Amino acid sequence: MTLTLAFRNLFHDRVRLAVTLVGILFSIVLVAVQLGLYLGARTMIISMIDRSDGDLWVMAYATKNFEEAQPINVRDRYAALATPGVASAIPLIAAFTDWRKPTGGSTLAVIIGAERDDGGLIPWNVIEGDVSGLGARDAVIVDKTYLSELGLNGVGDTAQVGAARVRVTGLTDGIRSFTVTPYVFTTINRARALLDMPADRITYVLVKVAPGADVEEVRNAIRVKVPDSEVLTKAEFRERSLNHWLFATGAGVALLGGAVLGLVVGTVIVAQTLYSSTKDHLNEFATLRALGSSSGYIHRVILAQAGLSAVLGYVLGMSIAMTIVYLSEATALPIVMTPALAAVLLALTVAMCTVSAIAAIGKVMRIDPAMVFNR
Amino acid sequence: MMTPDTATTPVSSLPASPGEVMLEARDIVKELGRGAGKVRALKGVSLKLHAGELTLLMGPSGSGKTTLLSILGCILTPTEGNLMLAKHETTGLPPEELAKLRRQHIGFIFQSYNLFETLTAEQNVKVALDVRGERGSEATVRAQRALQQVGLRHKLKSFPANLSGGEQQRVAVARALVGSPSVMLADEPTAALDSENGLAVMQLLSEIARDKSRAVLAVTHDPRTIPFANRVVRIEDGLIVGEERRAEGVETVHELARSRKRKANA
């Protein structure tokens, strides 16, 4: 009966129900978009690190993130290779450069140089062309999302990086960067040429630890051999990159702040409508109290009202959020929706509506049941 | 202070044997408001409600009728005095315990019916069982029986807005009745009804009061209700000033109508 009462109270005033649902819907969409962008940003920030085949990363000291590393000497690679417990040490280059568009003008791009045979960091999700095509003269592979940004139409188009010509031989799908700067995959030697980097320079050494070897021990051994560089585990490098882009730059804080704002606005709207609904039904609650209902019974009616609002608002809000997620898929800033995020959103919605019910419950608890005689 | 069972009772109308005492108020004092605005609404009221009796509490506006009803119904607590409900002492009980006593032992009927406008007649009656934790098909059957008892078996699925005032009050009676309370308290049950419906509701209350396990008290200032009562208690200025027992029992609506007709013909 509590559910029936809650349902009827809720649907009795359709306008107020609509206001409540709009409040919840607005809140869910805002929170979903903000958290979805946050998750999307996380995925983009760490995608290169996660895709790389290495347990340890050797890099210039104080490197803040994947894209902004200073060159190190290739000797570090050999030092790593000579360390007991190291199975492989793969050189990798990643650096910003200026991409000159065939259509005129230029844009920033991140050149990633790696050897396909090394298996350190090769392009994935290739939808046109082939990674083996990188062996061809001037070959590069870019993501289709950035074709327009790079002034390209597709495979076969050419552009210029520094003084050298590049030709697109393949396209990937979904390899996007947090900075909205296109990644350009090529070989390590071509990367050096495009970046005007000396032959003895690389950006990273990806170290794969031999089976059975202790990662921490190997790391300490390499540290001794490359005292001017830094050796991080994959997890540490992920964490450092995330901290830099999401928190040091304030981007993540802004996204999370937007989500919190959405929750606050939603809570206020739902609290107001629930409170006004409760006020309108105050005499009914007083009647329930006079009939001998416990406080818990009345709490359940109000909480059921809040819960029903939450479920309805969630279904509507998620429908709109999923549409936005779908529309953002092909953009440079995709919004990510995962089952875990959907569950978190449901929990947040229920929590928001429960908190909203507190004021209404407080109001009901203050009523004098004797008011049933004064109508 | 007067004790209605012993004071100012007309000798000619004493009943043969009143039933068991279902509710007893002793020396009830109630102060309302604070500071300079404090008012002593009840000044030492003692009253017993007996099973099998319909008692009317009559008095002018502001005499303390509703305040007394609220205290008898464990909705308000007295400033002084004691209240025994179905052999339970209520003095000093916390609100939740008083609510428990209300749902176990008291059925309320309100002047404005106080039905839930979003619920059907059957659901309105079931609410009284639901707050007691009685649910399911058994509760549905009991609610239907209660509505049958008040002659509304055919209106189970009707919403209050689609019922006449008399029908709404009968639903309220069914709601009060469905939990088989020891005491039924009615606040001006006929005030919002026309003459015919008012008499029908009083007839219903008098029939309910015949149950030897239940006492019924109705607050009213409608003199048309007197013929239905076993006992009339009068309150003025926060004090009980008189009581009358009707020795010959309760007239039915038909008897009342016949009596009116005779008077009109005379």
Image: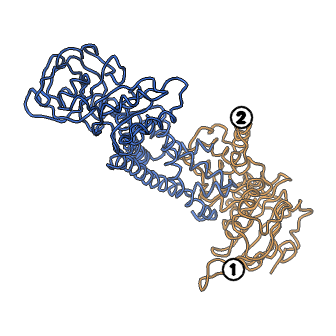
The amino acid beneath tag 2 is Ser
| Foreground of the two, B246 or B129 | B129
The amino acid beneath tag 1 is Asp
Residue at the bottom extreme, as displayed:
B36
**Mark identifier at residue B137:** 2
Can residue A143 be seen? Answer: no
- Please name the color used to draw chain A: blue
Residue A75, position in %: x, y?
A: 33, 31
For the point 63% across and 46% down, the residue is B124
**Which color scheme does this rendered protein use?**
by chain
Work out how far the residue at label 2 is from the one at label 1, CA to CA, in angstroms: 48 Å
Circle 1 residues within 10 Å: few <14, some 14–19, many ≥20: some
Rendered view: B200 above or below A4 = below
The N terminus of chain B - image quarter? bottom right
Residue A103, position in %: x, y?
A: 8, 28
| Foreground of the two, A127 or A183 | A183
**Disc 2 element:** helix
**Mark identifier at residue B237:** 1
Rendered view: B53 above or below A22 = below
**Disc 1 element:** loop
The C terminus of chain B - image quarter? bottom right
**Precedes in sequence: disc 2 or disc 1:** 2
Rendered view: B175 above or below B36 = above
**Mark identifier at residue A367:** none
For the point 61% across and 84% down, the residue is B35
Report the chain holding disc 1.
B
Based on the displayed image, in which of its 4 quarters is residue A241 positioned?
Answer: top left
Left or right of A135, for residue A75: right
- Please name the color used to draw chain B: orange
Residue B100, position in %: x, y?
A: 75, 56
Report the chain holding disc 2.
B
Based on the displayed image, in which of its 4 quarters is residue B2 positioned?
Answer: bottom right
